[in-house]
Image (cartoon, rainbow, N blue to C red):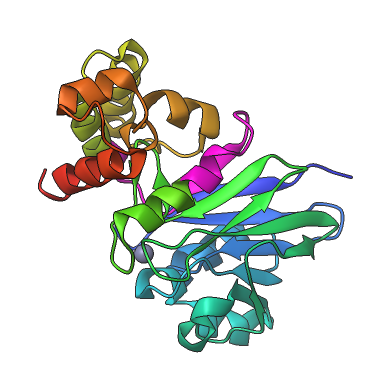
């Protein structure tokens, strides 16, 4: 089986567009559809034809181009069952634990409620790829619009259980702000400090900070490190639950 090819580009202001392409069959999926024009340009640049849209959640900046792209390419839209009523053009709704096939590559559906109540991530175990959208960002996580910190912590814990060498694509280029916040929570983390400095440089040069990996996020993303003794002591929360530590970090970021 041939390796999947990926194309990453910016949509709107800070949304990532991602195309996933199987060179053998020609199948091409857009992970979410934030904006039609940059997606069409990426398809054109690569010479690919859209066959699928994999929708992670109902927010407008993730589904804006669903209908236009479906009309143009007759693409199949797969999205979360829990939000099917608010996903434009949805053809196939999927739930947690379901597995479907993209050009012979298994795709596992992981429900990660918190940012929205029905948010899903797409995990391709054979390809070691995760599309985390607005659940997990580089050095950050999504805002809790439709869930409690406890719910989001459980969702993030599902992603933490994936292998460290899983490559993670995410929904927004928020990493510079996330890095500046992360060092205030985990100031003694040498790997985080190095990473934060690299991110300043990458963004200064106009580069993207995606993708990341589960292992790198485990070691440097404060939102995944609620169990870390140094972070707990820094926050004065030595005896609190992981979810309570996570809630405090999320609250601080909301006010950062
Ligand atoms: Zn969102």
The x, y position of residue 19, in whole percent, is 60, 56
Question: Ligand 1 sits in which quadrant?
Answer: bottom left
Give above or below for 152 relative to 184: below
Give above or below for 205 relative to 89: above
At x 45%, y 47%, the residue is 156
Give above or below for 214 relative to 251: above
**Residue farthest toward the front in the current orientation of the protein:** 239
Q: Is residue 19 left or right of residue 242?
A: right
At x 35%, y 23%, the residue is 228
Choose top left, top right, bottom left or bottom right for residue 72: bottom right
- 24 or 98, nearer to the observer: 98
Magenta-drawn segment: 157-175
Per the image, is 148 magenta?
Answer: no
Residue 15, visible in the rendered structure: no
Q: Quadrant of the N terminus?
A: top right
Q: How many marks?
A: 0
- 197 or 8, nearer to the observer: 197
- 116 or 196, nearer to the observer: 116
Choose top left, top right, bottom left or bottom right for residue 193: top left
At x 37%, y 14%, the residue is 191
Q: Quadrant of the C terminus?
A: top left
**Residue farthest toward the left in the current orientation of the protein:** 255
Residue 102, visible in the rendered structure: yes
The x, y position of residue 196, in whole percent, is 29, 23
The x, y position of residue 7, in whole percent, is 58, 49
Q: Is residue 236 left or right of residue 67?
A: left
Q: Is residue 230 left or right of residue 91?
A: left
The x, y position of residue 69, in whole percent, is 57, 79
Per the image, is 173 magenta?
Answer: yes
At x 53%, y 27%, the residue is 215
């Amino acid at each position: 089986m041939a390796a999947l090819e990926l194309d990453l580009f910016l949509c709107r202001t800070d949304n990532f567009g991602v195309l996933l392409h199987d060179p053998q069959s020609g199948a091409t999926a857009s992970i979410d559809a934030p904006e039609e024009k940059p997606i069409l340009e990426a398809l054109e640049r690569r010479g690919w034809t859209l066959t699928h849209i994999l929708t992670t959640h109902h927010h407008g900046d993730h589904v804006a181009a669903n209908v236009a792209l479906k009309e143009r390419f007759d693409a199949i839209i797969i999205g979360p069952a829990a939000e099917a009523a608010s996903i434009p053009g949805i053809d196939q709704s999927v739930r947690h634990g379901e597995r479907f096939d993209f050009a012979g590559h298994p795709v596992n559906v992981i429900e990660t409620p918190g940012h929205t109540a029905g948010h899903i991530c797409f995990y391709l175990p054979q390809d070691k790829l995760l599309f985390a959208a607005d659940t997990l960002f580089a050095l950050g996580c999504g805002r809790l619009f439709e869930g409690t910190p406890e719910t989001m912590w459980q969702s993030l814990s599902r992603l933490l259980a994936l292998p460290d060498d899983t490559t993670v694509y995410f929904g927004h280029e928020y990493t510079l702000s996330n890095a500046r916040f992360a060092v205030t929570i985990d100031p003694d983390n040498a790997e985080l400090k190095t990473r934060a400095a690299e991110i300043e440089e990458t963004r200064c040069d106009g580069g993207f900070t995606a993708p990341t990996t589960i292992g790198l996020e485990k070691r440097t993303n404060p939102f995944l490190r609620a169990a870390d003794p140094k972070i707990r002591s820094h926050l004065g929360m030595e005896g609190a639950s992981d979810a309570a530590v996570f809630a405090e970090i999320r609250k601080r970021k909301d006010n950062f």
